[in-house]
Image (cartoon, coloured by chain):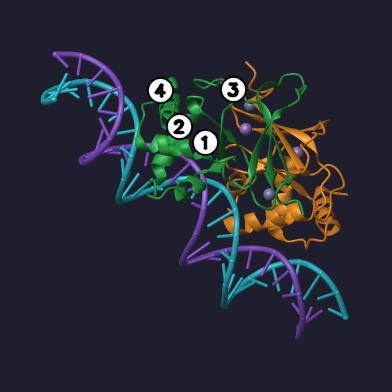
Chain colours: A orange, B green, C purple, D cyan
Amino acid sequence: MTREKDINQMLKDHGLSSTETRRTILGFFHAADKALAHADIETMGTVPLDRVTIYRTLQSFVEKGLLHSIPSADNAVRYALCKDHCADGHHHDNHVHFMCDQCSRTYCLDEITIPRIKLPLGFTACQTDLVVSGVCKTCQS
Amino acid sequence: MTREKDINQMLKDHGLSSTETRRTILGFFHAADKALAHADIETMGTVPLDRVTIYRTLQSFVEKGLLHSIPSADNAVRYALCKDHCADGHHHDNHVHFMCDQCSRTYCLDEITIPRIKLPLGFTACQTDLVVSGVCKTCQS
DNA sequence: AGTCCTTTGCAACAGTGTTGCAAAATATTT
DNA sequence: AAATATTTTGCAACACTGTTGCAAAGGACT
Ligand SMILES: [Mn+2]
Ligand SMILES: [Mn+2]
Ligand SMILES: [Zn+2]
Ligand SMILES: [Zn+2]
């Protein structure tokens, strides 16, 4: 089974019709070993992709459980492939993320789960985001 | 010692000259029991404050250790008063933050410290942000 | 191939944050 | 207290992120 077939199937499996743009963008995420922001995707392809289409594609991918979003302090949400069987708005990726202060590269630390936080009375947790920033392994002098 | 004297002194103590706008904005933070975003501050006063001045004031306050910033998924950084003796870019507020999905109110959970995360080899941590989202105590039905 | 429905591309817009520069306010010196 | 030096403010202009409406193009299905 070739990679294109794979990407095609992945879209169908998550209830998305297989279009050129979606295959391209999903391909970018499979090729990259890091999280991608909207701005990255905009300049990655040979043919430039429409800004709005990228936004809508990313939204669909998050909704359908293909990608999860990673908050950041620099106001540019990044996205990464879901490893677990996330689907239909039910995500299970509660792992730590790391963002490098020098290269801005953002990593999923899939093996490190976010510890459960005991909240004060009256607060109910729905989601927990934990982002560590510092220097990544490739920027280490 | 009156509140105005207090605010005045706080500015001086952190190496900032005491100006009308700075006193006003610092006053807002003392009055609020929640984190404030730029947009909040813009509409809070009787006389509207200049957008750019607010941005620069918030920057100065963070640099000088009066405020700390709280990242969020909705691309609007919030700010809250530092409790500890933060100064000159050295912050010590490593507590958990909570953001309500319904009212967007953001709380500092000062008593809950962020657990230390063991990173993979080659990664060096500099800062850790932990934001829990869900339903806050006032929105609980 | 033809039909139906979804997705795309474009324009237009709203929100967030930054920079440069002259005028005003604050701090410091005389 | 007045003059001077330094910082801060306000304005205009800009860059970037993200959203919405709508007609045209593209995919799915028979
Ligand atoms: Mn991840
Ligand atoms: Mn806080
Ligand atoms: Zn790096
Ligand atoms: Zn609430």
Disc 2, disc 1: CB below 8 Å?
A: yes
The quarter of the picture showing ligand 3: top right
- Where does the image place residue A117, in percent across and percent down from the top left? 79, 34
Q: Is residue A23 left or right of residue D9?
A: right
Disc 4, disc 2: CB below 8 Å?
A: no
**Which residue is the site of mark 2?**
B3
The local secondary structure at tag 1 comes to helix
**Which residue is the site of mark 4?**
B12
The local secondary structure at tag 4 comes to helix
Chain letter behind tag 1: B
Pair 4/2: label in front: 2
In the depicted structure, whether residue B60 falls above or below residue D28: above
Disc 1, disc 4: CB below 8 Å?
A: no
Q: Is residue B129 left or right of residue B36?
A: right
In space, the residues marked 3 and 4 are separated at their CA atoms by 17 Å
The quarter holding residue D23 reads bottom right
Tell me the crowding category of disc 1: few under 14, some 14 to 19, or many 20 or more residues within 10 angstroms, Cα based.
some
In the depicted structure, whether residue A59 falls above or below residue D29: above
Kindly identify the amino acid type of the residue bearing the numbered disc 1: His
Kindly identify the amino acid type of the residue bearing the numbered disc 3: Asp
Kindly identify the amino acid type of the residue bearing the numbered disc 2: Arg
In space, the residues marked 1 and 4 are separated at their CA atoms by 16 Å
Location of the C terminus of chain B (image quadrant): bottom right
Q: Are marks 1 and 3 on the same chain?
A: yes
The quarter holding residue B84 reads top right
The local secondary structure at tag 3 comes to loop
Chain letter behind tag 4: B
What residue appears at the point 73 percent right and 61 percent down from the top-left corner? A19
In space, the residues marked 4 and 2 are separated at their CA atoms by 14 Å
Give whichever of A101, B16 is nearer the camera: B16
**Which residue is the site of mark 1?**
B30
